[in-house]
Amino acid sequence: MAQSTVNLPYFDLLLDFIDQSPTIKTAFNRHVHWGYWPNPQQARFTAEDFAIAAERLSREVYGAAAIANGQTIVDVGCGFGGTIASLNEHFADLKLTGVNIDPRQLDRAKEWVTPQNNNVINWVEANAIDLPFDDASVDIVLAVECIFHFPDRQQFLKEVRRVLKPGGQLAISDFLPSDILANIPLLKTSLADYSFYGGFDISCTINSYRDLAQKTGFCLALERDITGETLPTYDCLRQLGAELKQFEPSALFQTLALEFVSRLRLLNYWILKFDRW
Ligand SMILES: C[S@@+](CC[C@H](N)C(=O)[O-])C[C@H]1O[C@@H](n2cnc3c(N)ncnc32)[C@H](O)[C@@H]1O
């Protein structure tokens, strides 16, 4: 199997277990992100329910952009290819590219996502801050729940602006801290060796995003806080963690900490859409 150049212990664990546990496979074969429940009180916390909710989250994110048949669309940090798969199923004549820094994930995506509806799909190993695409060549860029791993948000936004056609759009989902939480150093870690979720930076507030958008030639056209609709994810993760029968102290600590600050609405889950000037 190809090696990863980035340290993401949660993906190492997933890749080890996904083909051994039908439950883990049901939950994560397609998407590796939080779920979206329009009625959170109706969440059932099963692997099947979680997978449906994760599919909904992808649709909410790409639904923020004006996707249309025939477009060129890049999904950066594409995981196992679930968002590309969903676009492939619902639209036609698309030129789709999934980008990931981890070739092991791209190998899995290649195996199960089959082009249909006259769509063309490519899988490209690259770093989000150095995209291998021509200037003004892409209609839509997506980054579902991954920007916090990228080495530099501003560099990523600049790079996306370069590859987008004028009028093009970027839709993302991200964890945004409240102003109270924003200055806590634990929101950034480059200590990927000790962190279940690898290196991350969840210190960018909505005001920082507005500034970044302005600096990099975007208009922040949609700001949508969907924290409430994502909270059942934590109950699902508890069930799925028990299924793994692996005790990873940093997994437990980091997930509980995320849940704690999310339930207090100190850390919120947003969908953002940027229009390129
Ligand atoms: C939480 S997962 C989300 C995966 C996928 N977007 C999804 O929603 O299922 C974060 C993803 O970001 C990718 N990633 C992390 N750093 C990256 C980078 N610098 N460039 C490209 N992809 C990166 C990881 O390999 C992983 O696939």
Image (cartoon, rainbow, N blue to C red):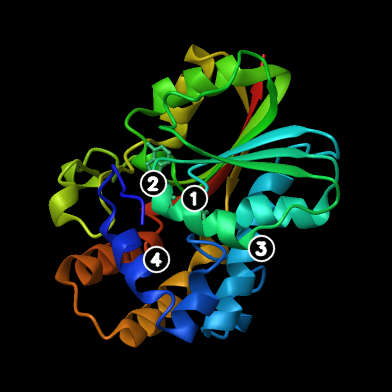
Give coordinates of residue 248: x percent, y percent. 19, 72
Q: Amino acid at mark 1?
A: Leu
Q: Nearer the viewer, residue 178 or 38?
A: 38
Displayed quadrant of residue 16: bottom left
The reply, left or right, for residue 42 in relation to residue 270 is: right
Instruction: Characterize the local packing of mark 2: few (<14), some (14-19) or many (20 or more) Cα atoms within 10 angstroms.
Output: many
Q: Which residue is mark 3?
A: 56
- Within 8 Å of ligand 1, the CB of disc 2? yes
Say whether mark 3 is within 8 Å of ligand 1: no
Which residue is labeled 1 in the image? 106
Label 2 vs 4, first from the N-terminus: 2
**Which amino acid, mark 3?**
Arg
What SS does tag 1 mark? helix
Q: Quadrant of residue 137?
A: top right
- Horizontal arrangement in the rendering, residue 56 relative to residue 110 (left or right): right
Marks 2,1: beta carbons within 8 A? yes
